[in-house]
Amino acid sequence: MQIKNICCIGAGYVGGPTMAVIALKCPDIKVTVVDLNIDRIAAWNGPIENLPIYEPGLAQVVNKARGRNLFFSTEVDKAIDSAEMIFMAVNTPTKTEGEGAGMAADLRYVEACTKNIARVAKTDKIVIEKSTLPVRTAEKIKEILNKQGSSGVHFEILSNPEFLAEGTAIQDLFKSDRVLIGGDSSEKGQKAVQTLVNIYIKWIPKEKILTTNVWSSELSKLASNAMLAQRISSINSLSALCEKTRADIEELSKAIGMDHRIGPHFLKTSVGFGGSCFQKDILNLVYLCKFYGLHEVAEYWHQVIKINDYQKKRFAQKIIDHFSGDLNGKKIAILGWAFKVNTNDSRESPAIYVAEKLFKAGAIMEIYDPMVSKESVFSDISFYWEVSKIKDLKSRISVNDSLTTLDLSVDAAAILTEWDEFKNLDFSKTIVFDGRGVVSSSKYSIGKG
Ligand code: NAD
Ligand code: UGA
């Protein structure tokens, strides 16, 4: 089957970049990315230097394809109607209420999309799970589509999870380690798989396109994130032991990673992993294990999250302890707010947690991140901090919009995102607590004792 029209529901960190790359590589396919968020779509259609997502290389890709065969729109129904292939790239956060609250994935957005497709579709569609989903979600999607869709319309569901990392999304999409496509074993299922393979094959080598059954594909995504996060928690747990024994965590990490069976990646100690996915995906995995009665397996993976919480807490406590438990009147510079370098995304950023602990211990804080705006910092504070109303918030927290106005004559500086521009700052007037190992001479780096 020759695809002429693709629709992607969800214009976020995944939908935007993945569709921009598909449009770039397949100029003969019209790609329409739709979203209910009017401001987000307006930003995708706005000035190229102000796209809603900061990602190196993204603006260049969008600039080439936008208006040619890449379109951003709020007209969801229209795009569904004219597409032969529909990607669902909507958010799947952790549930906050009901059964599985605090653990299971909240599938309400996926469900809403599915119902929308069922309501609108008048011709056969290949529906693709791009969002990260619990294993066997495709079954529920199929049930809704078959029950609520027009009679005579055939829906084929594929799983095609996304493995890009923020900050390197474009290079990850150009040169993916693998593209995973899960489909039904029936003739129609395999035909749909082949149709998607034919799109990726335009730029991904054949041997890197892996086809599996739907359940393996869905579960591989959760398992991949869990394995990556597990390595970070492993190295972070060892950083605590290094501090007790005067072993150096960076030397340890290098020595471990040189074993080709282990490899060097994801062994960098930190103040803890952040981002919108690792924690929620592992919690989802833990929930699934419990659901299937695999309590030991659930506990094993839960430990990855517990060590991550321990590391964030340990880092903040280290600063508080340095001032003998009292930060009243102490000025602390918080350098970095994004959850990692080269992104403007601060969802679940460790900086939010560390700043909260320091604030509650009495600190006056000066915050700076090159890509996160003042509005986003305050919006994170009101969303994440466990206080409904903080009286002296604005008098004790200032957010700088430039490095030049940042005052480093503070009592301490905490480096929480590995931005290059923090590497050459003059820290001679203050003590540095380095959560990212960027100032390797700092005796207060995590793991440096
Ligand atoms: P996001 O929050 O940035 O974007 C999701 C978008 O979907 C939002 O703009 C929202 O308005 C839109 N949306 C929700 N319901 C909708 C509906 N019914 N109709 C139209 N639009 C709707 O999320 P994201 O970071 O892009 O993540 C999306 C999915 O991809 C998640 O399942 C996530 O786990 C997975 N994932 C994310 C990353 C990443 O780096 N962020 C990487 C791999 C996989
Ligand atoms: C991660 C995975 O790497 C992607 O493959 C996956 O697609 C994505 O989650 C997802 O499903 O959302 P991302 O969270 O964007 O990507 O970024 P990572 O590079 O994985 O970093 C995550 C966190 O771990 C960051 O806070 C980072 O600073 C931290 N980290 C990473 C470490 O602390 N140490 C390391 O060695 C590597």
Image: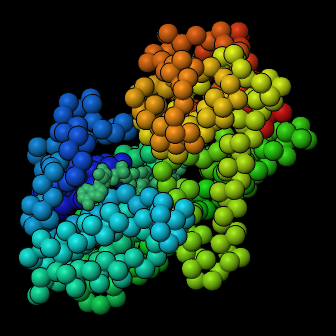
Residue projecting furthest to the right: 245
Q: Is residue 209 something one can see in this rendering?
A: no
Name the quarter where the N terminus is drawn.
bottom left
Residue 200 is situated, as x and y percent measured from the top left of the image, at: 29, 63
Name the quarter where the C terminus is drawn.
top right
* Scheme by which the image is coloured: rainbow
Residue 357 is situated, as x and y percent measured from the top left of the image, at: 66, 35
Residue 419 is situated, as x and y percent measured from the top left of the image, at: 53, 28
Name which residue lies at 56% across and 56% down.
279
Name which residue lies at 66% across and 16% down.
331
Q: Nearer the viewer, residue 177 or 431?
A: 431
Task: Choose top left, top right, bottom left or bottom right for residue 49.
Answer: top left
Residue 177 is situated, as x and y percent measured from the top left of the image, at: 46, 59
Q: Nearer the viewer, residue 390 or 197?
A: 390
Seen in the picture, residue 384 relative to 445 is either above or below; the reply is below
Asked if residue 224 lies left or right of residue 262, the reply is left
Residue projecting furthest to the bottom: 186
Name which residue lies at 25% across and 42% down.
40
Name which residue lies at 54% across and 55% down.
278
Give the total number of marks visible in the rendering: 0
Q: Is residue 228 something one can see in this rendering?
A: yes
Q: Nearer the viewer, residue 326 or 256?
A: 326
Asked if residue 406 lies left or right of residue 150, the reply is right
Asked if residue 20 lies left or right of residue 389, the reply is left
